Image: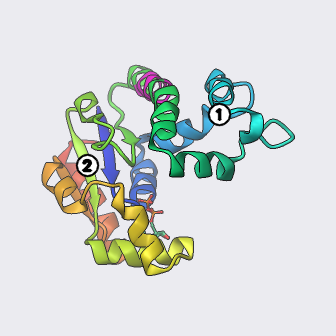
Amino acid sequence: MIMGLTGGIASGKSTVSALFARKGAALVDADIIAREVMLPGHPVLAAAVQAFGDGILHSDGSLDRARLGEIVFRDPEALQTLNQLTHPAIRREIKEQMYVLEQENPQRLVIVDIPLLYESELDHLFEQIIVVYVPRRVQLARLMARNGLKLDQAEERLKSQMDIELKRRKADYVIDNSGDPGATEQQVASLWDKLGLI
Ligand code: ADP
């Protein structure tokens, strides 16, 4: 069984994915895949260099994320170009990994963690989606603490994301991660049982 997992930035997607993995689920992590397509030697990185010049590379050939970030932050067209280069490859790799894992063991739960699942309109890939929810104020507090940000910087990061309340309403299952870690673990365990997993 394959399930999509999403939420907002710092709502606890990694934390909840790890809890599912501990119960025996297999994980596909879109963030890791997104980094892999920008590693030296990958055709997507080569295409990005074609588009933006080799100023986006460090001298060792690896991606200078800060430099690329500066370019696309100021220029919506450049951001669109970058997304057109990266998104199809990321999508392809997500699908490949999740179907391979499902075929390897159809009984096993495969959790596919995609931070921008709804924003990227990838919800059609999944019959069932879990949203890891915390209210916006908790989300902001955890984001500030984790990334050492001030309130206005944290709010800026949330701007480009769909409202977490809307994600909660779209979800098939909600894990409320606003309590202590034990409360979250209990919800994961009860969803695990409800899905008939062993
Ligand atoms: P995401 O993967 O959605 O960005 P994380 O799993 O990294 O979110 O969690 C965001 C931050 O909040 C991390 O610093 C994490 O340790 C912390 N955190 C996650 N769940 C809880 C919780 N139930 N109580 C307190 N802190 C939490």
Residue 130's mark? 2
> Dot 1, how many residues are within 10 Å of its Cα: few (below 14), some (14-19), or many (20+)?
some
According to the picture, the residue beneath numbered tag 1 turns out to be: 52
Which residue lies at the image location 52% right of the left edge and 34% below the top edge? 82
Task: Give the magenta range.
Answer: 89-98
The quadrant of the picture showing ligand 1 is bottom left
On screen, residue 181 above or below 66? below
State yes or no: discs 1 and 2 in contact (Cβ < 8 Å): no
Give the quarter of the image for residue 124. Answer: top left
154 drawn magenta: no
Q: Position of residue 116 (x, y in %)?
A: 36, 46
Q: Main secondary structure of the magenta part?
A: helix
Q: Position of residue 54 (x, y in %)?
A: 76, 34
Give the quarter of the image for residue 103. Answer: top left
Left or right of residue 77: residue 36: right
Q: Where, quadrant-wise, is the C terminus in this rendering?
A: top left
> Can residue 85 be seen in this snapshot?
yes
Left or right of residue 73: residue 192: left
97 drawn magenta: yes
> Can residue 179 be seen in this snapshot?
no
> In the image, what residue type sits under mark 2?
Ile
Residues at marks 1 and 2, CA–CA distance in whole angstroms:
36 Å
Which residue lies at the image location 13% right of the left edge and 54% below the top edge? 169
Q: Position of residue 119 (x, y in %)?
A: 30, 44
Left or right of residue 140: residue 59: right
